[in-house]
Amino acid sequence: MTHAHSPALPAAPIMPWDYLRLRRVAAGLTRVRLVDMIMLAGAKPYRACTKRPLTQAKVIAWLELVETPGTRIISRTHLDLLALVLPIDADVYVQLATESADRHPTLCGSCGVADDAVPVSDGRCRVCTAANRSRRLAA
């Protein structure tokens, strides 16, 4: 599924590694917590596609790697495994990883949500804009 494209690019396009980090942080997950969730949910699907054991050290190294600028997940199986525990849209990730920046979907610059009806003029979705406004009013 291809998502609609932004008519204008933000100053710095969101790349695949940015998308994963934004979605993880928006979900309130640290890398350590996400690793624990992958270990619980992912062990069985992982073993189905490889004979190698899934260890916490391997998952930590992999998660750090996929959030490193310039790195892309190339295995759809691994991407789908991550999507089991992290609120990401695998199709959006693939689009970010394979298409030029001018063909990326519109994403919220704060949380990475990929709903074309949501982003507003400042590059944030309505939820993030409202949360920011509430914090300013409370200060």
Image: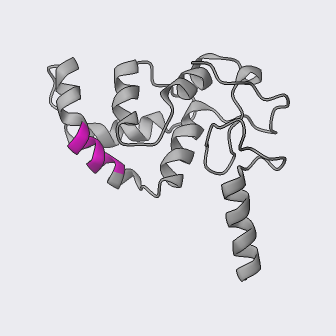
Quadrant of the rendered image containing residue 76:
top left
Q: Position of residue 49 (x, y in %)?
A: 22, 18
Task: State the residue in front, 77 or 31.
Answer: 77
Q: Is residue 45 left or right of residue 80?
A: left
On screen, residue 128 above or below 48: below
Chain part drawn in magenta: 34-41
Instruction: Identify the residue at the far front of this view.
Output: 117
Q: Which residue is rendered at x = 54% and y = 28% of the image?
A: 93
- Colour theme: one colour
Q: Can residue 104 be found in the magenta stretch?
A: no
Quadrant of the rendered image containing residue 40:
top left
Task: State the residue in front, 106 or 11.
Answer: 106
On screen, residue 2 above or below 121: above
Q: Where is the C terminus found, in terms of image quarters?
A: bottom right
Q: Position of residue 84 (x, y in %)?
A: 35, 37
Q: Is residue 113 left or right of residue 45?
A: right
Quadrant of the rendered image containing residue 3:
top right
Q: Which residue is rendered at x = 55% and y = 35% of the image?
A: 17
Q: Which residue is rendered at x = 73% and y = 20% of the image?
A: 103
Q: Can residue 35 be found in the magenta stretch?
A: yes
Q: Position of residue 102 (x, y in %)?
A: 77, 22
Q: Is residue 32 left or right of residue 16?
A: left
On screen, residue 52 above or below 28: above
Q: Position of residue 26 (x, y in %)?
A: 53, 53
Q: Where is the N terminus found, in terms of image quarters?
A: top right
Main SS of the magenta part reads helix
